[in-house]
Image: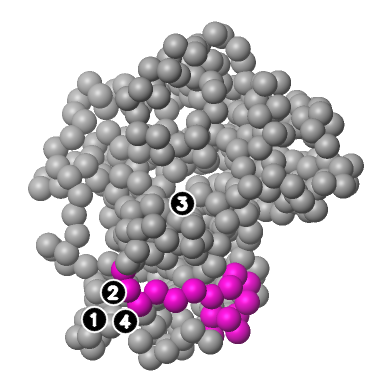
Amino acid sequence: MQNIINEAESVLLHTYNRFQVVFDHGNGVCLYDTNGKEYLDFVSGIGVFALGYNNKDYNDALKAQIDKILHTSNYYYNEPAIAAAKALTKAAQLDRVFFTNSGAEAVEGAIKAARKYAYNKDGQTDHEIIALEHSFHGRTMGALSVTGTPKYREAFQPMIGNIKFAEMNDFESVLSQVTDKTCAIIMETVQGEGGIYPATEEFLKQVRVLCDEKDILLILDEVQCGMGRTGYMFAWQKFGIRPDIMTTAKALGSGVPVGAFLMTQKVADSSLVAGDHGSTYGGNPFVGAAITKVFEIFEKENICGHVQEVGAYLEKELDKIANKYDVIELRRGAGLMQGLVCKEPVSAIINTALEKGLVLINAGTNIIRFLPPLTITEADVDRMIAILDESFAANV
């Protein structure tokens, strides 16, 4: 395994400080390294492998599509993409979709749609977008511009212009940034990288009303918190509101690289048209087959209902750990997107857990993030908690 790691470091650009492990295969909610060691996975590829590993129905659907056709480009129609679009728009309660290759690309498209919508209203190009502090929307230049963590942006200035930042769950902060040039407000319904920080119902509803009053587009980023992660297909659906534009990715393909941005018919009618946006790979037959099968499995296995049940159990067990160790300030999150906020950096705890066969990641330096496959059971939670308890005991 060390030889493989050494080879990687000789050829890959060093943009990640990787854990010293090489994963070879997975099964269910477990990963296995090249030495055959088993690890309980509470990261799921950063929220991607919602269905766990080696799901036979999912694998068979991809194998069948490989034997037909993988790619044609968007100059032509393909049936898997149409089926995927129908499933996604139905689940999201939105009208139109554009398929991308990643969450960052989905955010790029959402920004372009919002600016074109505003441009079509007044012919001006000086419109502003309000984003939130501590948010994370991706590392491409547009997505980075609305990411509310300065350390990610500072070396790559100048960003795209006319971006303002407000505070999460502080409506007055948002209101203070609104001008007659504001065309969109973008936020994660549950901030991921920024600390597993959910938007409150009151805040979301206040922002929605504001957007309705001023014809500002509400963009909700559900790249990490969507696709059943919180116990609802999309986290905003718990609160009885609807965005004008939404982004999704990660678990949408459950392992296949795909994202999407969706919008209402009103926005579609007044924004992007032929020639405004495109993607060579976006929505090809292969990812279309994956998305369609993901939605079929979600419905067949009642994934959202399962997440609500096991998510409540995970919260209860994490609360016990939080009460046991003074170094833990609090637990916060929703469903199977949880975080333990600590008073100190958590890297040593995460590394100890990995040695003991548990895969975890952080959100910032002092928060342990929990993003397991949505198929985990209470027994998996118990196993995770036992290792987590040992890892805290060894480091505090």
Magenta span includes 16: no
Q: Please tell me which of labels 3 and 4 falls first in the chain.
A: 4
Q: Please tell me which of labels 1 and 3 falls first in the chain.
A: 1
Disc 3 or disc 4, which is closer to the eye? Answer: 4
Q: Secondary structure at mark 4?
A: loop
CA distance separating discs 1 and 2: 8 Å
CA distance separating discs 3 and 2: 21 Å
Q: Which label number is shown at residue 125?
A: 1
Magenta span includes 161: yes
Residue 301, image x, y percentages: 56, 35
Q: Is 104 or 226 nearer to us in this picture?
A: 104
Image marks 1 and 2: residues in contact by CB distance under 8 Å: yes
Image marks 3 and 4: residues in contact by CB distance under 8 Å: no
CA distance separating discs 1 and 3: 28 Å
Pointer 4: residues within 10 angstroms few (<14), some, or many (20+)? some
Image marks 4 and 1: residues in contact by CB distance under 8 Å: yes
Disc 1 or disc 3, which is closer to the eye? Answer: 1
Residue under label 2, please give it. 115
Residue 177 against residue 256 in the figure, above or below:
below
Q: Secondary structure at mark 1?
A: loop
